[in-house]
Image (tube, rainbow, N blue to C red):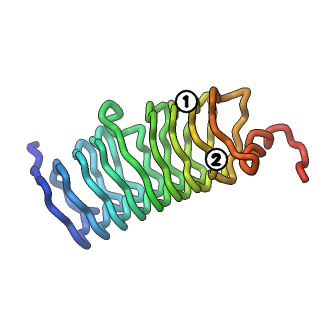
Amino acid sequence: MSKKYYDDKEFVNEDFSSVLELGEYDTCVFRNCSFANANLSMWAFNNCVFDGCDLSLAKLQRTGISNSKFISCKLLGLHFEDANTIVFSASFLNSNLNLSSFFKMKIKMMRFSNCTLREVDFTNTDLTEAVFLDCDLMKAHFENTILDKADFTTAFNFSLNPDNNRLKKTKFSRETVTGLLHHLDILIE
């Protein structure tokens, strides 16, 4: 099946949730579009911007997401590890990624700014130099995660066990360092 190719195009208020055609999008902007529950398997998004879009529960098998930005998007329950992980690169701003998964991904230097990342799975993920700027990480799962030089100085509600994760030169502030102590079941006043 051949893909439709779009270059430098803007899509506004479009509903892609029932589209069955494969698509390749290069330097495109999607504003207030819905991809909820869509099958985006083998689609490609290169240098794209998603602004105010809903991609919740979309299927991402071998989806190419390269150098793309998600701004004020709803990204609930996405399995990013199903995407084409060889080309995967993205940044997230003011977005809700609750219940999503980055299981076993190598996403060095990933940037999350002012995002809600509740119950996100970062198990066995390489997050070297990742930034979690003003992010809510309540019940996010970090297990065997590489967090070398990652920045948690303004992140909140996270719980990291230093015994089960790699934390070389990871950055924390005085206010956020308590997230390293939750596994000890102690009271901090």
> Residue visible at 15% across and 53% down?
21
Residue 188 % position (x, y): 88, 49
Left or right placement of residue 21 versus residue 93 in this view: left
Residue 112 % position (x, y): 49, 50
Residue 105 % position (x, y): 45, 33
Instruction: Name which of mark 1 and mark 2 comes first in the sequence.
Output: 1
Q: CA distance from mark 1 to mark 2?
A: 22 Å
Q: In the displayed orientation, state which residue is furthest to the bottom.
A: 13
Can residue 105 be seen in this snapshot? yes
- Label 2's element? loop
Question: Eyeballing the image, is 94 above or below 153?
Answer: below
The residue that mark 1 highlights is 124
Can residue 166 be seen in this snapshot? no
Question: Eyeballing the image, is 171 above or below 117?
Answer: above
The image quadrant of residue 169 is: top right
Left or right placement of residue 113 versus residue 44 in this view: right
> Residue visible at 41% across and 55% down?
57
The quarter of the rendered structure image containing the N terminus is: top left
> Residue visible at 67% across and 53% down?
156
Amino acid type assigned to the residue bearing label 1 in the image: Asn
The residue that mark 2 highlights is 153
Question: Eyeballing the image, is 5 above or below 96?
Answer: above
Between 1 and 139, the one nearer to me in the picture: 139
Q: Circle 2: is it few (<14), some (14-19), or many (20+) Cα within 10 Å? A: some
Left or right placement of residue 186 versus residue 143 in this view: right
The image quadrant of residue 171 is: top right
